[in-house]
Image (cartoon, rainbow, N blue to C red):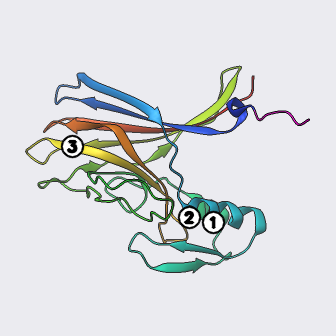
Amino acid sequence: MSKGVNISHVPVAYIELEVRDKNGKLIKKHRQPAHSWVKNFMNILRYGFANHDVPCTKQDGSTVSITINASLGWFLRVTAGAGDDSHGLMVGNGSKAFEVDDYSLDSKIPHGSNANQLVYGETTVENVVDDGSKLYFRIIRTFSNNSGSSITVTEVGLAVAGADNKPLIARDVLDSPVTVPNGGTLTVRYIIQYQYA
């Protein structure tokens, strides 16, 4: 008789969001499981394991075959610079339910300081931490609201550079929307962890 799988030993992900007002005061903190990897993510894993070209759907809906002549590191990079809303962590205000074939946010909030825009800071990736029972690292981005009015965020996405094709690999609809006041900031942390003890 085979033993059951201990799901605590499967890599999992979480999303943390912190909203601060214009004075830096924390006004909301939200955390939920991040469970919505899309089909592009599985294609990327196959790319890494098989060392073959990979079919991916770009955020505009077109399909491309990304060739191995781009290094794996470049392919998986999420460290978008400040002002670059094409990949890394991104946020939106759409309400469409998750589907495994999702290739973009339902309604991405673009970078900028005009109405319905957020200023995208850089996406950073921290070092792996071993706390004695689990390994984890965090992908982080801060968004600033200079639009003149509050902006509500309902979805979070993660896209990789993908040899400059920027495929989305994860999309999560938030259990509880967060509202970023004018002059405030939203920090999103995508935490990937593996419990080993």
Residue denoted by label 1: 43
Residue at 66% across, 21% down: 131
Q: What predominant SS class does the magenta segment belong to?
A: loop
- Give the tally of numbered discs: 3
Say what amino acid the circle numbered 1 marks: Asn
Name the foreground residue: 74 vs 37. 37
The correct choice, above or below, for 41 with respect to 61 in the image is above
The boundaries of the magenta stretch are 1-5
Mark 1 neighbour density, 10 Å: few (under 14) some (14–19) many (20 or more): some
Asked whether disc 2 touches disc 1, contact meaning CB atoms under 8 Å apart, the reply is yes
N-term-proximal mark, 3 vs 2 = 2
The tag on residue 5 is none
- The answer to if 74 sits in the magenta stretch is no
Residue 8: give x, y in percent of width and height: 68, 30
Say what amino acid the circle numbered 2 marks: Asn
**Can you see residue 121?**
no
The correct choice, above or below, for 124 with respect to 74 in the image is above
Mark 2 neighbour density, 10 Å: few (under 14) some (14–19) many (20 or more): many
Residue denoted by label 3: 152
N-term-proximal mark, 1 vs 3 = 1
- Marks 2 and 1 sit apart, C-alpha to C-alpha, by 5 Å
Residue 16: give x, y in percent of width and height: 42, 33
Say what amino acid the circle numbered 3 marks: Thr
The correct choice, above or below, for 184 with respect to 84 in the image is above
Image quadrant for the C terminus?
Answer: top right
Asked whether disc 1 touches disc 3, contact meaning CB atoms under 8 Å apart, the reply is no
* Residue 73 left/right relative to 114: right
The tag on residue 40 is 2
Instruction: State the SS at label 1.
Output: helix
Residue at 66% across, 67% down: 71
- Marks 3 and 2 sit apart, C-alpha to C-alpha, by 27 Å
Q: Quadrant of residue 84?
A: bottom left
